[in-house]
Image: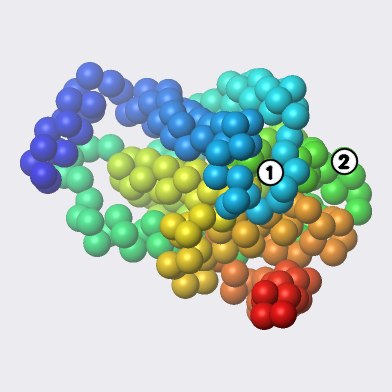
Amino acid sequence: MASLLESGWLYLITHFSEFQLATVVTFIIHESVFFLSGLPSLYFERSGLFSKYKIQKKSNAPASQDRCVLLLILYHVCVNLPVMIVSYPTFRFMGLKSSLPLPHWTVILSQILFYFILEDFVFYWGHRVLHTKWLYKHVHSVHHEYATPFGLTSEYAHPAEILFLGFATVIGPALTGPHLLTLWLWMVLRVLETVEAHSGYHFPWSPSNFLPLYGGADFHDYHHRVLYTKSGNYASTFIYMDWLFGTDKGYRKLKALGEEMKQL
């Protein structure tokens, strides 16, 4: 398996420059993972499939969903791709590598775990700042246009927010100077996580049912459907930041009330 992966990687670095791999190929991987993982929840909403697992009973109008998809394509091409291109020299300076040998799996695992923890911490505080009155009104309210989120709304945001909170995603790799393979794996996992959190569905097989401290769709959906000054649940991936700083109290009360109603 390792030799097969290295052979495939050798083909990539032989036929493409590091700049092409780190920018264009990274963009293609991101778009593929994002839309392939995000479109199912859009289809579920339109078709009514898995409706019993839908967190909110209301759904978005097809025209609203179409508008989201079109704007996402525009933002990705006009904001995300240029940022990837412009930031390449910085990542190169910070130690980004693409050559063989590939990093050991323990290095990859430890770096990605570090990225998740650091991203969650930085995102939490950045997200709380975006919920202050002026920034919410002029920037973050764009993301909250969809009070009933579906997977693709995870990256639907004001361009300024894309840059602002995108910093949380890239700071870990920028500090450690990872191998490009590690960067790709981190990007894929982060996209899958945020799409799942915005999916609007809580399935029996949802990761939050099995992974301790993982928030998931049920945790983040509450953030979208509550008035912005009282929403809480600001963290991106885990639940402990909101627990530590008391910004999950409304969510906990609602969950406790739900459990009481079940017992009646």
Tag 2 or tag 1, which sits nearer the N-term? 2
Report crowding for label 2: few under 14, some 14 to 19, many 20 or more residues within 10 A (C-alpha): few
Residue 40 appears in the picture as rendered: yes
Q: What amino acid is labelled 2 in the image? A: His
Q: Mark 1 to mark 2: distance in Å?
A: 20 Å
- Check the image and report above or below for 172 versus 159: below
Q: Which mark is residue 138?
A: 2
Residue placed at 37% from the left, 59% from the top? Answer: 111
User: Type of residue at label 1?
Assistant: Pro
Q: Is residue 171 left or right of residue 229?
A: left
Along the line of sight, which residue is nearer the eye, 99 or 131? 131
Residue 215 relative to residue 138: left or right: left
Residue 165 image offset from top left, x and y in percent:
65, 48
For mark 1, give the secondary structure: loop
User: Which sits in the foreground, 48 or 210?
Assistant: 48
Q: Which residue is mark 1?
A: 149
